[in-house]
């Protein structure tokens, strides 16, 4: 009686391709470089798959002994659901610790619940008076475009980047786990002690960069345009 063939992880077609390409190229790095179709595997996956094939004559996983995994049972699913509902910004490592589950099991449960991880986005903090001012500016631009079809050629698109000397909000591990995009943001005020790099582009030219030891307000902006 032959053992039941088991497939976990990558598709069987990827495993076969990894073995064939490795025997052709004789180099795992070349296999990755020339890989087409699905996302390329890592070097260790290729070497492990080749070793498995040479040891067993197959790229299938061997049957696993013991009880079937039950980490993603209904009880644990409900446990993770309650934790994320109460604190949707909790890191997955923290959720797995609270639920007494492995990190991989917690990730699988999160996907089973249909939750996605949305990273926090930084945005400039705005005053209440900024919003109507911006709306009025947009409406004025739309009116100009309606009255003058060449107006867009006179537009100057600018951008700025502030290099802070102090601390900034690190959003690398700031996620919000939700069924829909919550538009998770952090308002970041302009800080003192920074270097502002400012540049722009229009239909005729590119100008800048300008290095400014201050924030770019309407007066600074106007002086740059006038120069």
Image (cartoon, rainbow, N blue to C red):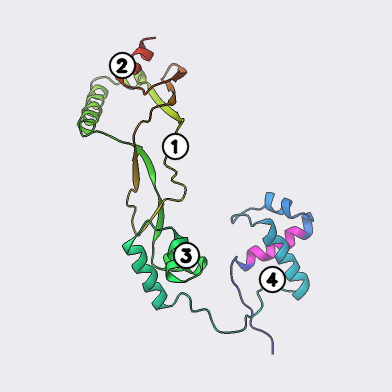
Measured Cα–Cα span from mark 2 to mark 4: 68 Å
Q: Judging from the image, what secondary structure is the residue with disc 4 in?
A: loop
Q: Is residue 20 magenta?
A: yes
Measured Cα–Cα span from mark 4 to mark 1: 50 Å
Q: Residue at x 75, y 67 (%)?
A: 51
Crowding around mark 2 (Cα neighbors within 10 Å: few <14, some 14 to 19, many 20+) is few
Q: Position of residue 89 (x, y in %)?
A: 37, 56
Q: Quadrant of the C terminus?
A: top left
Which residue of the protein is positioned furthest toward the top in this rendering?
227
Is 26 on the left-hand or right-hand side of 112? right
Segment tinted magenta in the rendering = 13-22
Q: Position of residue 115 (x, y in %)?
A: 39, 61
N-terminal-most mark, 3 or 2: 3
N-terminal-most mark, 1 or 3: 3
Q: Residue at x 44, y 69 (%)?
A: 109
Q: Residue at x 43, y 16 (%)?
A: 204
User: Mark 2 near mark 4, Cβ–Cβ under 8 Å?
Assistant: no
> To which residue does mark 4 refer?
59
Q: Using the rendered view, name the quadrant where residue 98 is placed.
A: bottom left
> To which residue does mark 3 refer?
107
Q: Is residue 188 above or below residue 28?
A: above
């Amino acid at each position: 009686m032959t053992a039941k063939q088991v497939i976990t992880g990558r598709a069987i077609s990827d495993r076969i391709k990894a073995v064939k390409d490795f025997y052709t190229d004789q180099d795992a790095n070349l296999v990755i470089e020339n890989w087409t179709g699905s996302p390329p595997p890592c070097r260790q996956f290729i070497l492990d798959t080749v070793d498995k094939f040479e040891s067993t004559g197959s790229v299938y996983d061997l049957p696993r002994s013991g009880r079937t995994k039950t980490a993603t049972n209904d009880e644990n699913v409900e446990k993770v659901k309650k934790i994320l509902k109460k604190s949707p910004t909790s890191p997955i490592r923290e959720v797995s610790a609270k639920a007494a589950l492995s990190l991989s099991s917690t990730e699988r449960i999160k996907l089973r619940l249909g939750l996605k991880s949305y990273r926090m986005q930084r945005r400039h903090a705005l005053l209440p008076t900024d919003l109507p001012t911006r709306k009025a500016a947009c409406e004025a631009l739309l009116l100009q475009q309606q009255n003058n079809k060449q107006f867009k050629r006179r537009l100057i698109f600018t951008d700025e980047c502030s290099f802070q000397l102090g601390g900034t909000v690190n959003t690398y591990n700031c996620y919000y786990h939700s069924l829909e995009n919550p538009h998770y943001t952090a308002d970041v005020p302009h800080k003192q002690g920074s270097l502002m790099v400012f540049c722009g582009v229009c239909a005729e030219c590119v100008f800048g960069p300008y290095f400014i030891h201050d924030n770019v307000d309407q007066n600074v902006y106007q002086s740059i345009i006038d120069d």
